[in-house]
Image (tube, helix red, strand yellow):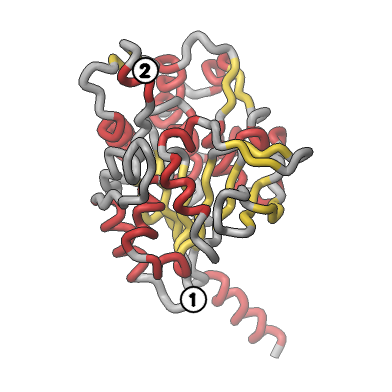
Amino acid sequence: MKKLLLLLLVCSSAFAQKQKVWLDADTGNEMDDVYAIVRLLWAADRVDVVGLSSAHFNNADLVTFEKWNQYATSGLSPILVSQALNEEILNTMGLQSIPHPLGADRQMGRAWGGFQPRPSAATEKIFEVIKSLKPGEKLDILTLGALTNVASLVALDSTVKTRIRVFSLGGGYDFAKRAWNKNEFNVRCDLNAYDYLLNRANLDWTIMPIHSVMHYQFDRETIYERFADDNPTEQLMEKRWRETNPQDTKRTLWDLGLVQAYLLPDFAPVATVAAPPENQQPTVKIFTKIDAQGMDADFWEKVKLHR
């Protein structure tokens, strides 16, 4: 009887369904998105990555300065830059079969406010995934930039709130004062979307405030030395540093921190705190801190494993 029970447990474990995950990334904005995307795709043994959508990184600098990182701002389409990089990553890793639709090219509403949704190929495909879920199953959506695509999804059909869990990077939280700060890049790229989601009751949303992850830093020379010259995926990550931030000897890999926190919950405790007082949702979950050393060791272990 014990042997039969053990066999049933083994079979049940073998056929257990992996958690479905969708990643939404403003990949063209900085270098850390590439690292975050690769890390999640390396987790195929644990999660089922069912989509990778592009997010815009529209900001005031694009109309006032001649360059944004290595890109000339004249005629620049942030969403297309993110989309091209998403496709390059999937092609490099031989994972072109993963859906990779184009996201919204601008914020919700207008510059002065408003919550007009931005339908896109991304929202359309995410709807398809949600409709295919089994009863009781949820889709985890990780967002690395502006929340336009996720907020538009909810605005277009509020019933999806019960079928998704959102994990995002952005905003600040002062633990001593228990106060929020929305003056942060990802939030500023679409404050309307951020506020829209903070006004949705019963949305399962976990936020990584920037102060919880800012010490997750990588060393430039370590990256250059440890990445293999004959590994296309590692070279893609190294190239992104060389092209985007060659002047920086150290960089905080914010987006990688969110993905690692999601994959390694023991390294990133979560607490429920009061939402900003100007919003309608009473509470929201946040990652309070991360074990940067543990996450760093995990990253390099995965690099070796996937060579």
Seen as rendered, the residue at the extreme left is 75
* Residue 109, percent from left and from top: 33, 45
Q: Nearer the viewer, residue 17 or 62?
A: 62
Q: Mark 1: which secondary structure?
A: loop
Give the class, few, some or many, for how many residues have Cα within 10 Å of label 1's Cα (few <14, many ≥20).
few
Front position in the image: 22 or 72: 72
Which residue is denoted by mark 2 in the rendering?
68
At label 1, the amino acid type is Gly
Which label sits in the foreground, 2 or 1? 2
Residue drawn at x 52%, y 36% as measured from the top left: 255
The number of numbered badges drawn on the structure is 2
Question: Please, is residue 31 above or below residue 289 in the view?
Answer: above
Q: Nearer the viewer, residue 305 or 273?
A: 273
* Callout 2 amino acid: Trp
Lower sequence index among marks 2 and 1: 2
Give how far apart the Cα atoms at labels 2 and 1 are. 43 Å
At 34% across and 12% down in the image, what residue appears?
65
x, y (%) of residue 244? 42, 17
Q: Residue at x 49, y 76 (%)?
A: 136
In this picture, is 69 found above or below 50? above
According to the picture, the residue beneath numbered tag 1 turns out to be: 136
Q: How far from the left and from the top, in percent, is residue 160?
A: 40, 66
Which quadrant holds the N terminus? bottom right
**What residue do we see at 35% from left, 36% from top?**
111
Residue 202: name its quadrant.
bottom right
Neighbour tally class for label 2: few under 14, some 14-19, many 20 plus, Cα within 10 Å? some
Quick check: can you spot residue 105?
yes
- Give the x, y percent position of residue 184: 53, 31
Dot 2 falls on a residue whose secondary structure is strand
